Structures are given as C-alpha cells and as structure tokens.
Amino acid sequence: MTDFSIATWNINSVRLRLPLVLDLLEAHEPDVLCLQETKCPNGSFPDSELRKRGYKHIEIHGQKGYHGVAIISKLPLTDVERRDFCDMGDTRHISAVARAGDRAIRLHNFYVPAGGDEPDPKINPKFAHKLGFLDEMKAMHSEAERDDGVSSILVGDLNIAPLETDVWSHKQLLKVVSHTPVETEGLNEVQARGAWVDLIRQHIPPEEKVFTWWSYRAREWDVSDRGRRLDHIWSSADLSPALRNINVLREARGWERPSDHVPVFAHFKF
C-alpha cells in the first residue's frame, strides 16, 4: 500500500506568503502542493527555500503580478504541459505526471478566471472570458490517458461554488458571480462530460456546508462565516475508491497576513 496526499491552495502571491507555505509544508507534509495565483514570473519564483525542505520537483507557469500556477512535489514530475486557454496568454494551467507507488497520475492545476462583478457576458468581458474558459475545459476527459495507464487528478481555484451548500446563502448569491446558474451549470457540465469525481463531496455529504474562501471585506470572517467553496479536488473514477480523507484547513484563514482561500488536502491509499 502507498500513501499519497495532495493539497491545493490559492496563495494570492507566493513571495508575499512564502512563510505560510513553508509552515504548511512543515506541518502537513503533502506529497504535492498545487498553488494558484502565485503572481510571480518564472525567474522570481522562490524555489530554493522549497527545495531545502525536500520539495525538489517544482514546475511553474507564472507571469508578473497576475495569475500563475505551480506544482511543488516531493515526487518526480514528468510530461509537463502548460495550456493557454482562450488564447489569452494567461498562466492559468499547468499539469504533470507523478507516480505514487505503481500509479501514474496526471495532476492538473487550474486557476479559472474570477469573472469580474457583473454576470453578463454582453457587457462584462471578464465574465465572457470565464464562460469561454469553462467551454474549453469541457473537452478535458479524466480518462484521456487511461490507455497509457495514467489516471487523473484535477485541483485548483475554479472560482465557482456549484452547490447550494457551497455558499453561505444560495438565495442571496444567485445573481453574484461564482454562484450564478450559468456558471454552476457550466462547471457541472465540465465535470459530467469529463467523468470527473468531486472528491470533496464524495467525502463530505452534499447536505453539509463547506467553504474554502472568505472575503477580505469581512471584518469577522469566522463569526459571520459568509464563505464559498471555490477550491476543488476532482479525480478520475478509478482513484475515488482510494480516497481516505479530505481536510479543509479552515484555520489558515485566520493566520497572519493570510490568503482569502484556505488549503484543501486529499489523502489516498493505493
């Protein structure tokens, strides 16, 4: 049997919050950490501190001041891909193959566009971009590499809370970007077409509320608890029976100078 763990975290500037990343790695020791919104060009990524802590395999796709994704791993990474969704030149996706025991797993790390404030693609180009991004994601199938013996895990800040229990108030957020019907239906279609399994909801019943993001605007975020589940971990169906635990590290939102997202972990036993 082989234990394998992966974490996803929108860090909102990896250089600004590197001490939090290092503390997380020391305390929880995931095999792989996927970061989003690193806001860092490739040449300035703080990889040396990560390598000192045993994470010697690092693949990045970054740009100055915006977006950016990274895979930080104890395990060797091969067959790295960086896709330019919507031909925007944004650094919002990276993938690589890792081996956990006898399993080869394609790890997809996504940062889906937030979509701006107005949920109307006719007047808001950012929202149109988000919907276009989702349309391109619908072509991704979790079993695309099964003939080669490769399974799939997809993680990241998908910037959509699909279920009523993924937001603090379904009724009040129906017209708010991240929970509008066109977005949730789009994400559900990405999942259905690609035969992806929502591992968070496999482990935590859909009837229970789960949040991974709380706005910086909330003075007492923990008391008001007006959160959303924007961060996701999906897998191909063959991996879902091996899932042992999901851990949403809620307390990270209360750390000093935190991200507005918290890390989410998935633990497997193969």
Image: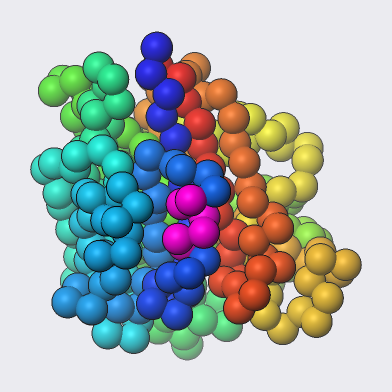
Of 42 and 22, which appears nearest the observer? 22
Is 25 inside the magenta-drawn segment? yes
Quadrant of res 13? bottom left
Residue drawn at (25%, 65%) of the image: 48
Task: Please provide percent x and percent y for residue 141.
Answer: 29, 36
Residue drawn at (59%, 30%) of the image: 245
Quadrant in which the N terminus appears: top left
Of 29 and 96, which appears nearest the observer? 29
Magenta-drawn segment? 21-26
Display colour scheme: rainbow
Is residue 28 at all visible to an observer of this figure?
A: yes
Task: Please provide percent x and percent y for residue 267.
Answer: 50, 31
Q: Tell how many labels.
A: 0
Give the vertical position of 95 relative to 224 (above or below): above
Q: Is residue 19 left or right of residue 173?
A: left
Of 75 and 10, which appears nearest the observer? 75
Quadrant of res 36? bottom left
